[in-house]
Image (tube, rainbow, N blue to C red):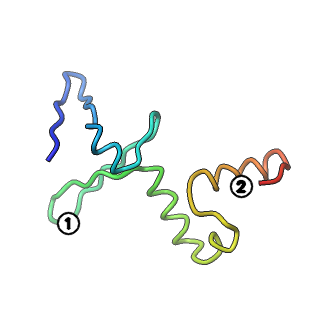
Amino acid sequence: MNLAKVSANGQITVPVEIRKLLGLRSGDKILFVQKDNGEIVINNASAQAIYKAQRAFSGVSEDMGVYNEDDVQNLVNEVRYGGSR
């Protein structure tokens, strides 16, 4: 179990173990989701966006070789700048 203290400004520092588990990097956003039972779940918002996009394009992303945030960024760069991936 990890514990974080809320500052007077409502800020917390995410413990290093949790950052590692969530794959959080500097600048990432955290998504707070309340489940039906009232439990609050914390997710890496970037990772959740990738997973949601992959589900929406089931099969298509894999066919294009898009598996993670870096692959998406490479695809965006390719479209923007006309370079190869």
Question: Distance from label 1 to label 2 (Cα)?
Answer: 36 Å
How far from the left and from the top, in percent, is residue 2? 17, 43
Side of 31 where 28 appears, left or right: right
Location of mark 1 (residue)? 36
Task: Check whether the beta carbons of the residues at disc 1 and disc 2 lie within 8 A of each other.
Answer: no
**Residue 66 vertical position relative to residue 20 in the rendered view, above or below:** below
Residue lying at the far right in this picture: please name it.
82
How far from the left and from the top, in percent, is residue 14? 28, 37
Q: Secondary structure at mark 1?
A: loop
On residue 75, which mark appears?
2
How far from the left and from the top, in percent, is residue 39? 17, 58
At x 55%, y 71%, the residue is 56
Residue lying at the far top in this picture: please name it.
8
At x 52%, y 59%, the residue is 50
Looking at marks 1 and 2 on the same chain, the residue that comes earlier in the sequence is marked by 1
Side of 65 where 37 appears, left or right: left
On residue 71, which mark appears?
none
Which amino acid, mark 1?
Asp
Q: Secondary structure at mark 2?
A: helix
In this rendering, the count of numbered labels is 2
